[in-house]
Image (cartoon, rainbow, N blue to C red):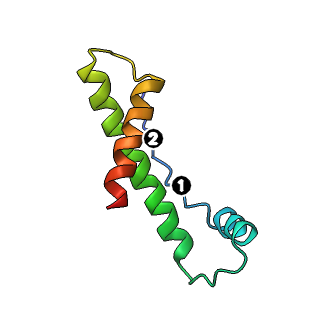
Amino acid sequence: MAPSTTVTRRVKRKAPRAFLKRTLKQKKPHLGLGRCCDLLIHLNCLLFIQRLAEESRTNACESKSRVIKKDHVLAAGKVILKKSRG
């Protein structure tokens, strides 16, 4: 018998462009948005979530916890928002 030759591929998910455009138009209809602004907003959200995860993990390690808890995420969110404010 021949060994199985199936190869698993990671499916690349696209950004939810229609959802973002629809949401932006509902919440802020007076804004004149450019063509690719939804992609920039999506990228910004992904970067924020990545920073939040890293900072939360750091907080959990400092408190000698194996699990990231709600308190770690809230503390990390405050720090990240202060840094992004400027």
65, above or below 77, in the image = above
56, above or below 33, in the image = above
The image quarter in which residue 55 lies: top left
The alpha-carbon separation of the residues under discs 2 and 1 comes to 15 Å
Instruction: List x then y, in percent, for residue 19.
Output: 68, 62
Q: Residue at x 43, y 46 (%)?
A: 49
The image quarter in which residue 53 lies: top left
Dot 1: what SS?
Answer: loop
Q: Look at the image and tell me whether residue 3 can be seen.
A: no
Q: Judge left or right: residue 43 versus residue 16.
A: left
Instruction: Check disc 1 and report the residue beneath it.
Output: 13
Most foreground residue, 16 or 20: 20
What is the number of the mark on residue 21? none
Which part of the image, by quadrant, shows the C terminus? bottom left
Q: Residue at x 64, y 64 (%)?
A: 20
Instruction: Check disc 2 and report the residue beneath it.
Output: 8
Instruction: List x then y, in percent, for residue 40.
Output: 47, 69
Name which of mark 2 and mark 1 comes first in the sequence: 2
Q: Residue at x 40, y 23 (%)?
A: 68
State yes or no: discs 2 and 1 in contact (Cβ < 8 Å). Answer: no
Instruction: List x then y, in percent, for residue 44.
Output: 44, 61
Most foreground residue, 27 or 23: 27
Instruction: Decide: few, some or many residues near mark 1? Use Cα within 10 Å; few <14, some 14-19, many ≥20.
Output: few
Q: Residue at x 40, y 50 (%)?
A: 81
Instruction: Decide: few, some or many residues near mark 2? Use Cα within 10 Å; few <14, some 14-19, many ≥20.
Output: few
Q: Judge left or right: residue 37 versus residue 58.
A: right
Q: Judge left or right: residue 2 versus residue 38.
A: left
Dot 2: what SS?
Answer: loop
